[in-house]
Amino acid sequence: MWAVSTVTMLVLAGILPDFQLQSADDESTTRLAMTAALGAGAFGLLSALVWPLLVRLLLLVPALVLGLLVFFLNGSLLIVALRLVPSGDSEAAPETAVIVAAVMSAVASATGGALAVRDDDAYRRRLHRLADRRRRALPPGPSSPGTVFMQLDGVGHDLMLAAVGKGLMPTVARWLGEGAGAGERPTHRLTAWRTDWSSQTGASQLGILHGSNHDVPAFRWYEKAAREVMVCNRPTSAAELQRRAIDRTGDGGLLTADGASRGNLFSGGADEQALVLSIATKRRDRRNRSRAGYFAYFSDPANAVRTALSFIAEVGREIGQSSRARVRKARPRVSRGGLYPFVRAFATVVERDVVVAAVMGDMFAGRTAVYADLVAYDEVAHHSGPFGRDVEKVLERLDRALALIEKAAEHAPRPYRLVVLSDHGQSPGETFRARYGLGLGDLVRAGCGLPVPRRARRTHSGAEARAAVRAALRRPVEEGGEQHRPSRRRSEPIVLASGNLGLVSFPDVPHRMTKEEIDARHPALLTTLANHPGVGFLLVRSERHGGVVLGAYGAEIPLDRLDGDPGPLEVFGPGAADAVRRTHSFPSTADIMVNSAYDPADGEVLAFEEQIGSHGGLGGAQGRPFLLSPLALSAPVDDGQDLVGAEHVHRVLRRWLREANGPQVPVETEPQERAA
């Protein structure tokens, strides 16, 4: 490697005018080569000794600026290395040093096999060397198999089948016996499962890892008791949700025995945690290191440069793709400017590289259970849509990541079973605002008779809402521009969105309001929402029936009668009534739960957020994720039965861990939820 770096430095010195290895009065080839060798050696030594310290400092820096810092720091190390060379007057301009250091690291990385991502001999040799070093440092691993759970965030069951059919995911195709090889026998089975009403990562992953997602009605919701908005991807909220789940089940989670949690919202009870959101607010120590995965990965400067180059390429790819979408005037379309290109690059490059490397390290260490989340597809699909060329490239790279982990298993100190699953799918469709010209919050305010923005008042939906308010208050419909205002001041409703699921709460009322209370306070609100063409149904509490589903044209069906008459829920398919009834039982369910309309002909929903690929409520592919499991494990459910809910998935995964006959979750039977 040192020789390669020396040659690279010599070549760059001959090409770049601002990069010289010695003073102009000494042109000896031998002296030049010696200077290059010393410079490369000094650069390599600094990279090995100083770079890890710099990376540890980078843990205090936001990850989105990591890509640029990698280049500047690498260039700074090269300048220092040239100053340490005793021969000549070697020097490089700062901008040139950045280029030289990046090229040297990239060439060294490629030579060492770190850039190889396909099935080639160089990468196999590198894996083998790394595994051998681990084996010499650790005692022999157990003979029982370990289990790796890889979560492909947002990839639905039907999308997975389509990707396999198009040849986008050859590794998965081979596991299912649909690969290129003739007569290839399957090693895995593909099972669909059904999410809860809240079809999003917070509810699903909490249920999968901790066995309970009780009282998680959406991705974000207002809790009246605490007077705060809970958001699943906020570190403080994630920590609180994890604490509640542990208190409810009396168990630490799926990964409590020799487990590792990588890139997740929740820990699952693992001892080894990296990039886990629920511990991000805790003081870092040996057991709680939310960003330690970055240090483990970027302490190798070759990894840092490789990922930084890929990061920049992904930013350029997103800018190019969004520009083409604007030129073609593609519909539906949402804004993809600002920081989004960098957010996408982080999710599809940095997070992927760090998590995959961490999982491979866990396998080489012989850990019993590993759960990791790859968020790349979900992030891109929100802005580019669940289908199309943009996401196809992401799916190809996810399949390549699975292939890398499969190769790592060949060199691990124990056999591994690889389980792949998703937490939800994504449903396509334009946004509610794009379709109707106003957001859900505007519609709620109009239905309450509160002032709304002028652009919302001019829309058809806004005009209908104002007319409904006037009629309910027995005011003339033709009444001019006068706005009805409540006679006594009340706090305004809080309207939150989780994909195509909306939540309306009245913060000045300490309890969950009933339909009768809402009608008395805002006579036109429920009718305005239920009759809107962009709304599928409402869930509210009733003094008479306990809970009712409201739909258009005055439909009002008590929850205990939904099985005989699903009403507006019929279009949402089997299980919708059970999902709604379960959410109704949650203490934190909003005063009004609003699910958007759903068109089963094209699978489209209307997101209340600015997303053209969305999830969070009922309707379409978002509620149908997948579970891909080895045939060596028992079937997830018996033939003819459905796998329903994240908590059910948790019980299946626990059963598979027990089947491995190794150190397992320390319980004799499945944990039962404690009484609330």
Image (cartoon, grey):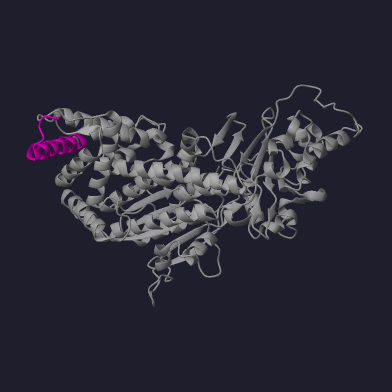
Q: Position of residue 427 (x, y in %)?
A: 60, 53
Who is closer to the viewer here, 250 or 301?
Answer: 301
The magenta stretch is: 24-48
Quarter of the image where the C terminus is located = top right
Q: Position of residue 561 (x, y in %)?
A: 74, 55
Q: Please, is residue 225 above or below residue 303 in the view?
A: above
The residue located at (78%, 40%) in the rendering is: 461
The residue located at (43%, 45%) in the rendering is: 314
Q: Please, is residue 352 above or below residue 47 in the view?
A: below
Please indicate, yes or no, whether residue 265 appears anywhere in the rendered image: no
Who is closer to the viewer here, 125 or 405?
Answer: 125
From the image, give the main secondary structure of the stretch colored magenta.
helix
Figure quadrant of residue 345: top left
**In the displayed structure image, the side of residue 53 where residue 480 appears, left or right:** right
The residue located at (41%, 64%) in the rendering is: 170
The residue located at (60%, 34%) in the rendering is: 223
In the image, residue 317 lies in the stretch drawn in magenta: no
In the image, residue 34 lies in the stretch drawn in magenta: yes
Please indicate, yes or no, whether residue 578 appears anywhere in the rendered image: yes
Q: Position of residue 531 (x, y in %)?
A: 79, 46
Count of numbered marks: 0
**In the displayed structure image, the side of residue 68 where residue 430 appears, left or right:** right
Q: Position of residue 323 (x, y in %)?
A: 54, 44
**In the displayed structure image, the side of residue 380 where residue 398 appears, left or right:** left
Q: Please, is residue 393 above or below residue 495 in the view?
A: below
Q: Residue furthest top?
A: 488
Q: Residue furthest bottom?
A: 183
